[in-house]
Each structure stands twice: as structure tokens, then as C-alpha cells.
Image (tube, helix red, strand yellow):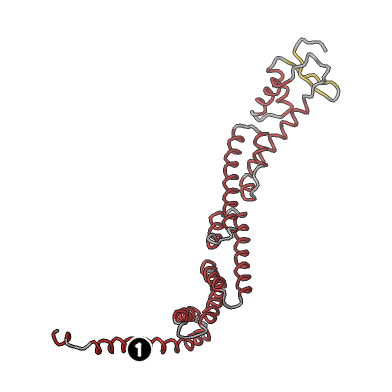
Amino acid sequence: MAALRQLSPRFWLTATLGSLIAVSAAALWWEQQLPSRLTKALDRGDYEACIRAGEQLAALRWLGEGAPDEQALCRQRRAEQLWRKGDATAALALQQKLVMSERGDVKQNRDTLQSWEKQLQDKAVAVFRQGDLNRAMALLKPMLQRSDGKARRLSYSLQEIWNRNQLERKRLDVLVDQERWWEALDSLNRLDHPWWQTQAGEQRERIEAAINVLGNAQEHHQHPASNRNGITGTELEQAVQDQLRNGIDPWDAFEAGCRSLGGLVVEDGPESFCRPLGAGA
């Protein structure tokens, strides 16, 4: 240790400079090897190795020229490869880096990115209409960090449509169970998603059948305005509906409902009405 301390400052300076020169020489030698490595990686289609070589060239650009353009070519080829394989997340991320680098054909790179995003958005909407919300959200996920927010707004819109239809379907089920047919029809018409409309097919049949029955019943008990002795109004309507719930024929339901109120069905030409027993014509 004493001998080391006796070494002159000139020795340490020489050693330090020597080390720096050696490191610089090694870096320069490696930088000179990278273009060849990059070219060979491109030729054999090894785009990951190509990207690594390009990134190393970019890190050593103070020693050489041309690394960014070569790196852009590597990213472009690799992004296209990933897109063809169906790895949209990785493809978009790499293409986004390429666009932000502003190297290569900037307009073409930007157009490619926008085209891929448009394809994913269209596919997300298509699978959403088929009833697969989770897959639609997964397709949009790679684009949710973009500054323009288009994919994010679409994501919110799809989620809102889904939630609204889901709640309306629950309300529809309640209305059908309660046989509130006209309200159920209004609820049914509020479903604006194809998949939810299909899921409500059974409810639609029940609603349309019930309303058709009610319409037929009403045709059988139209009441002349001049008949002041007839049993009319909500009381008769409720009595008829009570009978219809028992599954009987609309005309029989009208007669039974009329009888339950102490009346008798009387036909007057094309019209029929419920007249209290004992009342004059």
C-alpha cells in the first residue's frame, strides 16, 4: 500500500486516460459493427434483432450517423409483422413509437397507424353489436392512451349503451310479470341494442299477444254514446282484464266481466255493450 501511495500523479493520469481511450475505442469498434449486424438482421427478417441494433446505434449516434432512419425501418417492418400475426397491442405500440420518432415516411407511418386504429374500432363496434362487450373493450384498450381520446370516447359510449339496455331489460321483465302491457311495450321499444333486442324476443311475443287480445276485447264492447244505461269505463275494463288473465276467449271474457258487474251483453247492430239487468233499451 505504501508503494502504491508513492506512485506519481502522472501514473494515475496516464492510467485513467488509457482506460477512457480503451472504452472509446471499444465503443467505436462496436458502433462500426452495428450497421452490418442491422443489415443482416433485416435480410433474414429478424426484426427484433434489427430493432436492438438500431437502438444501440441510436445510443451511439454521437459516434456515427444514420441510426434513426435504420431504426425506423426496423420498427416499421416489425410493426407490420406483429399486425399480420394479430398482435394488435404490440403492433400499435411500436407504430406509435415510429410516428413519434418522425423518421422514415412520416405521413405513411401516421396513415398506417390511423388505419389500424380505425379497423380495431370498427371491429370493436361489430362485436359489441353481437353482444360481446368485454371483447369490444379489449379491442379498444391499446388505443385508450392516445391523446386524441377518440377510442376513449367510443369506449364510454359503448359502455353507456350496454348499461342502459341492461337496466331497461330488467325493467321490461318486471312490467311483463306485472302484466302492464302498454308500459312493457314502451320499455321494449327503448331497447336500442341488437343483442338486447334479440334477448327480449320472448317478452315481445307475450306483449304483442296480450295487446292483441285486449284490442279484440275492446272491439266487442264498443258502447254507443247515447246509451246512458250501459256499464262502461274503467270498472268494466278491469273486469274484462281479470277474465282475460284466466286465459279465456276475449268475447267470453267480455260477457263474464259484464255479468260480474250485474250486467247483460246486448248487441246493437255492429256494436255490443254491457247493460245492467232490468234496464230498458
Q: Residue furthest front?
A: 9
SS at mark 1? helix
Residue 94 percent location from the top left of the image? 52, 71
122 shown above or below 97: above
Q: Quadrant of residue 179?
A: top right
- How many residues crowd mark 1 within 10 Å: few (<14), some (14–19), many (20+)? few
Q: How many marks?
A: 1
Direction from residue 100 to residue 216 in the image, left or right: right
Front-most of residues 200 and 65: 65
Residue 269 percent location from the top left of the image? 86, 23
Residue 159 percent location from the top left of the image? 57, 50
Amino acid under label 1? Ile
The quadrant of the rendering that contains the C terminus is top right
The residue pinned by badge 1 equals 21
Can the viewer see residue 16 in this picture? Answer: yes
Residue 225 percent location from the top left of the image? 82, 19
Direction from residue 4 to residue 53 in the image, left or right: right
132 shown above or below 48: above
Q: Residue furthest left?
A: 2
The quadrant of the rendering that contains the N terminus is bottom left
Front-most of residues 124 and 4: 4
Q: Residue furthest right?
A: 269
Q: Name the residue located 62 percent from the left edge and 44 percent from the top edge.
A: 200
Can the viewer see residue 256 in this picture? Answer: no
Front-most of residues 24 and 3: 3
Q: Quadrant of residue 107?
A: bottom right
